Amino acid sequence: MTFRNGLSSLLRPEDSVLVLIDHQPYQLANLNSHDPHMAVNNAAALAKAAKVFGVPTILTSVVADRGGRIFPQITEVFPDQEVIDRTFINTWQDPAVVDIVKATGRKQLIIAGLWTEICVAMPAIQAAGEGWDVTVITDASGAVSAEGHEVAIHRMIAAGVNMMTWLALASEWQRDWARSETANALNEVVLQHAAGSGIAYLWEQQLLNTPLPGNQAKG
């Protein structure tokens, strides 16, 4: 097994491409590994982070006529983008998706979707076997059961797939808070979607702007 370590193994926005798979009503209705509210929140946060960093993002659904359309919290991030609707369960067997990914020229493939044990695991394992550097965002994905999610993660790790959460990915893309062209926009995503971290940031700003006792301006 090749270990993933060293600076060059960290994810870079200029080398990343994101595929969001089957964030649809049918899949959400039988999501039992995560709180459904968090699954939608985290998938939307991931989409927004990708947009902040200019990471090409492919949206795909499976048989949307029956399973429903991709969550609007995701599609509204990319309002002019067509969702690729598949019949293949395994996204990586659909040339309509794979050809677009290949055309980006990027090799750091990031995947999130519903369900982890099926529609995430299958393409992740196949792509890893074909030489792609594959990362799955676990908290923007979810399974029919907690066991299904956990077993799928173990299975993918054994196949050489990297695991991250959306906030860890966004931080890795940012890498340096002096990177001002994305820092403020990323902060907005954190404020809206990272709950405790976002509120802590607002609190920090409040404290920094609160006069010390005895130094209050007198009118």
Image: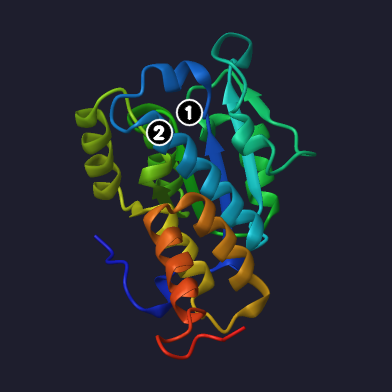
**Residue at (43%, 73%) from the top-left corner?**
204
Find residue 145 and report its horizontal and vertical position in percent. Answer: 25, 25
Residue 187 or 50: which is nearer the viewer?
187
Q: Position of residue 205 (x, y in %)?
A: 49, 73
Mark 1 packing: few (<14 Cα in 10 Å), some, or many (20+)? some
Q: Residue furthest top?
A: 66
Left or right of 40? Residue 82 is right
Q: From this viewpoint, which residue is outermost toward the right? A: 80
- 194 vs 203: above or below: above
Residue annotated with mark 2: 122
Mark 1 vs 2: CB contact within 8 A: yes
Kind of residue sitting beneath label 2 = Met
- Where's residue 182, x and y in %? 63, 70
Task: Note whether 193 is above or below 38 in the view shown.
Answer: below
Q: Return the residue nearer the eye: 123 or 139.
A: 139
Residue 215 horizontal side relative to residue 71, left or right: left
Report the amino acid beneath label 1. Asn
| Residue 12, position as x, y percentages in the image | 53, 69
Q: How many marks?
A: 2
Relative height, residue 93 to residue 29 (above, below)? below
In the rendered structure, find residue 32 and report the number of the disc placed on it: none
- Quadrant including the N terminus: bottom left
User: Could you tell me which residue is drawn at 32 percent across and 30 percent down?
Assistant: 117
In which quadrant will I find the C terminus?
bottom right
Can you tell which quarter of the image residue 149 is in? top left
Alpha carbons under labels 1 and 2: distance apart: 6 Å
User: SS for tag 1?
Assistant: loop
Residue 11 shows in the view? no
Farthest residue toward the front? 219
**Local secondary structure at mark 2:** helix
Find disc 1 in the rendering and name its residue: 90
Q: Which residue lies at the image location 19% right of the left edge and 30% below the top edge?
A: 147
